[in-house]
Amino acid sequence: MEDKIPARGRSRGRGSQLVTYYDHFHHEIFNVVLDQIIVEFNNRFAERSTQLLRCIACLDPKNSFANFDNGKLVELARMYADDFSQYDCIVLRDQLATFIVDARDDPSFANCIDLGNLALKMVQTERHKTFPLVYRLIELALILPVVTATVERAFSAMKIIKTDLRNKMNDDWMNHSMLCYIEREIFASIEDDKILDCFQSIRSRNKQVPSGSGSSPMIDEERVG
């Protein structure tokens, strides 16, 4: 790694600048790839989303809460304005300062490796009652990945259902179709006869919808007449 080679982009003749293999790999390859990755992340994620992840990382209980940052956690609470009032944010700052001292002194928290274990340990030790705002913040941090995944699934379903050939689909029909697509495991467990009976009962029809057992359709003579 200490052997020298001509710098990239320089003439290999007399007077060319020499650099070590280490400098070549570190500055001309590693840093360039890292910059490209950072640019790609910045293009895909908004600054607010990135900051949200930074703040959530401050709740990580690993290594005795090594990433704990009181200021960023209060900032995280302010992002959830519907769940934390201005007064709650002031009280939360004091609760966080007391909680981190208490948690670091308690050996039972040393085994916590993620937010799920941290929330469980707080309930087991009844600290969710002593530090209710801290526990609420942890709950919101746990819910966030589920909510994000649900939104991503909804947008993916929208691209599949509302295509160029079906771009005039109204909102109600699209919402119903997306619900069936997203929760298809649940709908697959419903019997066909129940679906047909529900469809038949929506409004009066000239013909009876055939049952799922394969019987032939029956004409409702009263409605035809």
Image: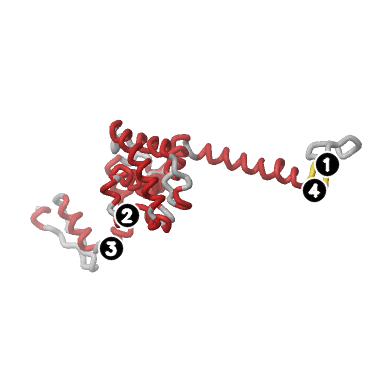
Give above or below for 12 relative to 217: above
The span from disc 3 to disc 1 (Cα, nearest Å) is 67 Å
The span from disc 2 to disc 1 (Cα, nearest Å) is 60 Å
For the residue marked with disc 1, what is the amino acid?
A: Pro
Q: Earlier in the sequence, mark 4 or mark 3?
A: 4
For the residue marked with disc 4, what is the amino acid?
A: Glu
Q: Secondary structure at mark 4?
A: loop
Q: For mark 4, does the 10 Å Cα neighbourhood hold few (<14), some (14 to 19), or many (20 or more) residues?
A: few
What percent of the width, then of the height, locates residue 133?
30, 42
The span from disc 4 to disc 3 (Cα, nearest Å) is 65 Å
Residue to which mark 3 is pinned: 189
**Are discs 1 and 4 less than 8 Å apart at CB?**
no
Residue to which mark 2 is pinned: 183
Q: Choose between 173 and 38: the one closer to the eye.
A: 38
The answer to whether 127 appears left or right of 46 in the picture is left
Residue to which mark 4 is pinned: 2
Q: Earlier in the sequence, mark 3 or mark 2?
A: 2
Outermost front residue: 105
Given this view, does label 1 or label 4 mark the residue nearer the observer?
A: 4
Q: For mark 3, does the 10 Å Cα neighbourhood hold few (<14), some (14 to 19), or many (20 or more) residues?
A: few
Q: For mark 2, does the 10 Å Cα neighbourhood hold few (<14), some (14 to 19), or many (20 or more) residues?
A: few
Colour scheme of this structure image? Answer: secondary structure
Q: Secondary structure at mark 3?
A: loop
Residue 219: quadrant of the picture: bottom left
Res. 132 visible in picture: yes
Residue to which mark 1 is pinned: 6
For the residue marked with disc 3, what is the amino acid?
A: Ser
Q: Earlier in the sequence, mark 2 or mark 1?
A: 1
What percent of the width, then of the height, locates residue 207?
17, 56
Label annotation for residue 159: none
The span from disc 3 to disc 2 (Cα, nearest Å) is 11 Å
